[in-house]
Image: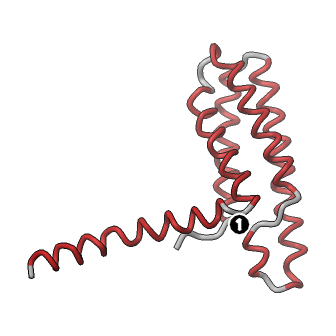
């Protein structure tokens, strides 16, 4: 009986983590989800390397990948748009595209800082972009269950 209770308890503890992982897998299976996953991977590495001027060449390559991914993602449709009433979809998509265009501008500025070797300003901009990313995810990404 104790073994059954322990197994049941272990399953209850693991269930939320399994559901969150399943949700992320579903999201990453969409073309936009795959692009965002690639961008996030490059972003995490860029944030680690941004303070080190010796890594600027690699950082610029990561930034180039992110810019390409941003371009690819701009015309894609977020999953949340499908859940909206048809009347609200156009405004939602317009807001999403504006957010992606703003990100592209900030990435271009970041590229300028890194190209000039100004890692201090690049670090400051990274923090601003990170805040924008969080805001954008709240507005355009499905909430985790």
125 and 64: which one is in front? 64
Is 52 in front, or is 144?
144
Q: What is the basis of the colouring in this image?
A: secondary structure
Where disc 1 sits, the SS reads: helix
Q: Residue at x 57, y 62 (%)?
A: 24
Pinpoint residue 120: horizontal percent, then vertical percent.
Answer: 66, 23
Compared with residue 69, is residue 55 higher up or lower down, i.e. above or below?
Answer: above
Q: Is residue 65 left or right of residue 2?
A: right
Q: Residue furthest top?
A: 54
Q: Is residue 121 left or right of residue 12?
A: right
**Vertical comparison of 98 with 70: above or below:** below
Image: 130 above or below 18: above
Q: Which of the 4 image quadrants contains residue 41?
A: top right
Q: Return the x and y of residue 125 as percentages of the image width and height.
A: 70, 35
Instruction: From the image, tell me which residue sits under label 1.
Output: 139
Q: Quadrant of the N terminus?
A: bottom left
Residue drawn at point x = 85 percent, y = 80 percent: 88
Q: Is residue 25 above or below residue 50?
A: below
| Residue 9 found in image quarter | bottom left
Give the x, y percent position of residue 34: 70, 54
Query: What x and y, as percent, mark residue 140?
Result: 72, 65
Circle 1 residues within 10 Å: few <14, some 14–19, many ≥20: some
Q: Residue at x 64, y 64 (%)?
A: 27
Q: Taking 32 as reference, is 50 left or right?
A: left
At x 90% / y 74%, what residue is drawn?
90
Report the front residue among 135 and 66.
66
Q: How many marks?
A: 1
């Amino acid at each position: 009986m104790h073994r059954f209770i322990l197994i049941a308890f272990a399953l209850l503890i693991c269930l939320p983590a399994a559901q969150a992982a399943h949700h992320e897998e579903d999201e990453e299976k969409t073309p936009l989800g795959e692009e965002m996953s690639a961008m996030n991977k490059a972003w995490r590495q860029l944030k680690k390397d941004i303070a080190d001027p010796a890594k600027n060449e690699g950082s610029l390559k990561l930034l180039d990948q992110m810019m390409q991914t941003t371009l690819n993602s701009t015309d894609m449709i977020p999953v949340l748009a499908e859940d909206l009433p048809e009347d609200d979809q156009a405004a939602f998509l317009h807001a999403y595209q504006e957010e992606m265009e703003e990100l592209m501008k900030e990435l271009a500025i970041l590229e300028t800082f890194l190209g000039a070797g100004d890692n201090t300003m690049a670090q400051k901009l990274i923090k601003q972009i990170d805040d924008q990313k969080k805001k954008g995810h709240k507005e355009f990404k499905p909430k985790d269950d």
